[in-house]
Image (cartoon, rainbow, N blue to C red):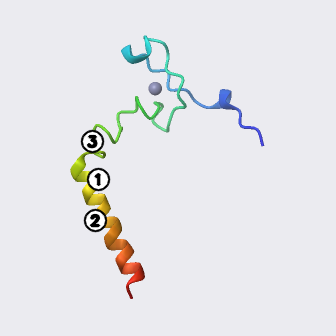
Amino acid sequence: MTFDFKKLPRCGAKARSNGYQPCRQAAMQNGRCYFHGGKSPVKHGFYTKQAMQERRDLKEFCYRIRYEE
Ligand SMILES: [Zn+2]
């Protein structure tokens, strides 16, 4: 199976980080890629220590419900 990357919508954002070249990442539904879409989980604390801990607790909790009965 071939996957034609050229047909995918492109992000096209020009950013200092890529030398003001149009971003070539595949765009999401909002027309921007993961990095330029403004919904980066990094910016919203998704990877903060506390969030990591909370997710770990939740995972453990779910795991227990499923397997301890
Ligand atoms: Zn982009």
Do the residues under discs 2 and 3 have CB atoms within 8 angstroms? no
Residue type, mark 3 in image = His
Decide: is 5 above or below 51.
above
Q: Are dots 3 and 1 in contact, CB under 8 Å?
A: no
Image quadrant assignment for residue 56: bottom left
Kind of residue at disc 1: Met
Q: Position of residue 2 (x, y in %)?
A: 76, 38
Instruction: Indicate which disc, 2 or 3, sits on the residue closer to the N terminus.
Output: 3
Q: Name the residue rendered at 43%, 11% in the picture.
A: 20
Q: SS for tag 1?
A: helix
Residue nearest the viewer, comparing 65 with 22:
65
Q: Is residue 23 left or right of residue 4?
A: left
Residue in the picture at 34% in, 42% down? 41
Q: Which quadrant holds the N terminus?
A: top right
Distance in Å between CA atoms under marks 2 and 3: 19 Å
- Residue 52 is labelled as 1
| Gap in angstroms between the C-alphas marked 1 and 2 | 9 Å
Nearer to us: label 2 or label 3: 2
Please tell me whether residue 47 is drawn above or below residue 8 in the rendered image: below
Q: Which residue is mark 2?
A: 57
Quadrant assignment for the C terminus:
bottom left
Q: Which residue is mark 3?
A: 44
> Is 64 or 8 nearer to us in this picture?
64
Q: Amino acid at mark 2?
A: Asp
Nearer to us of marks 3 and 1 is 1
> Is the CB of the residue bearing disc 1 within 8 angstroms of ligand 1?
no
Reading the chain from its start, which is encountered first: label 3 or label 1? 3
Question: Image quadrant of residue 8?
Answer: top right
SS label for mark 3: loop
* Res 13 quadrant in image: top left
**Nearer to me, 23 or 32:** 23
